[in-house]
Image (cartoon, grey):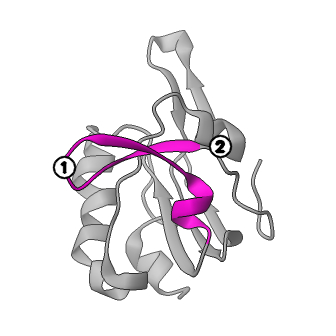
Amino acid sequence: MAKVADRLPDVDVRVMNAEGRPETVRTAQLLGSGTVVLFAVPGAFTPGCSRTHLPGYIANADGLAEGKVLMLADDNGDFSEAMGLVMDFAGSGLGKHSRRYAAVLEDGVITSLDMEETGAVTVSACEAVLAKL
């Protein structure tokens, strides 16, 4: 499992390019320099993710590094697996998902990592992360 002082894994993820099409990029390219806040949502269209977790980051984007939020798609879960932050719900038919967490990165190194208990949005909420910056 990823921890403070670890270098972020360098794997493929997808972003939407300027033309609105998915583009494959490496995490080191996107997240490897400067101060970066990274947060993961386990179910993009679940109430905790789409009504609470993500909106907090969008509302507070001006207080984050460079003042923007960039969505990354971890299509196959390769990044979550490399971070060691996967929850397996296969027994209930939901498959594997990332755990809900927030991390602060400095030049690709994890300087803060806070993981949520299942169903919670507290330590990984934008307000909690902003207090660490």
- Find residue 2 and report its image quarter: bottom right
Q: What residue sits 25% from the left and 69% below the top?
A: 58
Residue type, mark 2 in image:
Leu
Residues drawn in magenta: 12-32
CA neighbours of label 2 inside 10 A, class few (<14), some (14 to 19), many (20+): some
Name the mark on residue 76: none
| Quarter location, residue 80 | top right
Disc sitting over residue 19 in the figure: 1
Mark 1 residue element: loop
Query: For the point 55% across and 11% down, which residue is it?
Result: 91
Magenta segment includes 21:
yes
Res. 64 visible in picture: no
Helix, strand or loop at label 2? It is loop
Magenta run includes residue 133? no
Point out the tag, 2 or 1, that comes first from the N-terminus. 1
Image x and y of residue 52, in percent: 28, 57
Where on the picture, by quarter, is residue 82? top right
How far, Cα to Cα, is label 2 from label 1? 31 Å
Q: Nearer the viewer, residue 39 or 122?
A: 39
Residue receiving disc 2: 85
The extreme left residue here reads 19
Disc 1 residue type? Glu
Q: From the viewer's perspective, tell me whether residue 3 is left or right of residue 104.
A: right
Marks 2,1: beta carbons within 8 A: no
Q: Where does the image place residue 24, in percent across and percent down from the top left? A: 45, 42
Task: For residue 63, say whether it is visible.
Answer: yes
Q: Residue furthest front?
A: 19
**Residue at 52% over, 74% down:** 36
Residue at position x 76%, y 63% in the image? 7
